[in-house]
Image: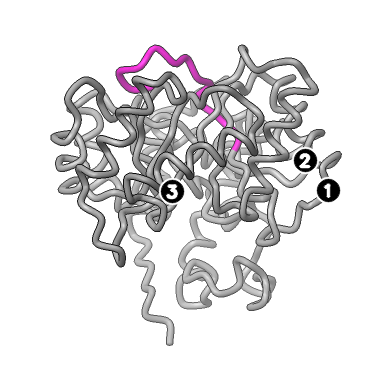
Amino acid sequence: MGTSDLKVSIVGLGTWQFSDSWGIKDYEQAKSIIEKALDVGINFFDTAAVYGRGLSEQFLGRAIKELGVREDVVIATKLPGEFLSRHDVFKGTKRCLERLGVSYIDLMQVHWPPLWNNFPTCEYMRALEELVHHGVIRYIGLSDFPVELVDSAILCLSTENVVSNQVRYNLVERDAEKELIPYAEAYGMSIIAWSPLAKGALTGKYTPENIPKFNDVRGGSAIFHPQNFSQIYEVVKLLKSIGEKYKKTPAQVALNWLLMSSESVIVIPGAKNPEQVEENAGAADWRMSFGNWLTLEEASSKVRISRVTW
């Protein structure tokens, strides 16, 4: 993980699904997903204070405690932009520790910049650095920060460094390649790719005739708007075709493409059942040919997702 000493699986497990948004509110179901992740070699678990307003952290922490694997896993969580005054950084971190039931957090990330609250960057970054000194967090990461704010955040630190930036990155949403990934590569940071399967658009589950309903958490997403998904589906068809050559699923091919594109990238797909966890982990034990990688590179480069859908 960046310049840290954290050793993480390049396929992690995102846990936003343990919330009202994605509908996994049964602890035993969540535990089965976490247990399967451990069984297939995943040791990196990403959560956030806002996922289910703490439910995701509670489920993750409880499962890790019951399975007795705290020292074998890397836990990453996040403080939202609204929790970034100096006092709230301390208070919010204490709440995260309590929900997770742990004495320290491996990676504390700033979930997004405090766009509406006007907290100075150095106020919250120095507070996070103090928490490292207190031993309650081990490393500092960012999420959804542009390069300019990553620079500012790093300059605020005196003894620590920013080891990661978590950003949206998948085969059809590739804006991170313009600045964020080159920056990470230059300065030894990890890019943690959230939504690496484009909210399921790249799994092969959906067709232009069968897209999520608007009241689904995915339904209002621009990627599922007909003008966009019709382009994305051309890439999905290629994922299926290439997957057949390697006996891999479209999701495994899409994740493998990301992992081949930069050594800085770690992917954190979510999963709603143990079978999906095992499928996602199967993206990491092989490499497609350069020719197949290039076919997807060229096809996805033609996709133009417009978010002006109304």
Q: Which residue is mark 3?
A: 171
Q: Bin the neighbour count of mark 1 within 10 Å (Cα to Cα): few under 14, some 14-19, many 20 and up.
A: few
Q: Mark 3 or 2, which is nearer the eye? A: 2
Q: Please, is residue 150 above or below residue 12 in the view?
A: below
Q: Amino acid at mark 2?
A: Ala
Quarter-of-image position of residue 220: bottom right
**Residue 1 to residue 19: above or below:** above
Which secondary structure class fits the magenta region best?
A: loop
Of residue 153 and residue 82, the one placed in the foreground of this image is 82
From the viewer's side, name the closer residue of 76 and 250.
Answer: 76
Magenta-highlighted residues: 1-13
**Residue, x 29% and y 49% (percent of image)?**
145
**Quadrant where the C terminus is found in the figure:** bottom left
Mark 1 or mark 3: name the one nearer the start of the chain. Answer: 1
Mark-to-mark CA distance, 3 and 2: 27 Å
Pair 1/3: label in front: 1
Report the disc number at residue 26. Answer: 1
The residue sitting at 53% across, 49% down in the picture is: 238
Q: Which residue is the site of mark 2?
A: 30
Q: CA distance from mark 1 to mark 2?
A: 6 Å
Place residue 297 in its image quadrant: top left
287 vs 54: above or below: above
Asked if residue 22 lies left or right of residue 218, the reply is: right
Q: Are marks 1 and 2 in contact (CB under 8 Å)?
A: yes
User: Residue 194 placed where, x, y %?
Assistant: 47, 45
Q: Dot 2: within a 10 Å radius of its alpha carbon, few (fewer than 14), some, or many (20 or more) residues?
A: many
What residue sits 62% from the left and 13% below the top?
72
Give percent across and percent down for residue 79. 45, 46
Amino acid residing under circle 3: Leu
Type of amino acid under label 1: Asp
Labels 3 and 2: the sequence-earlier one: 2
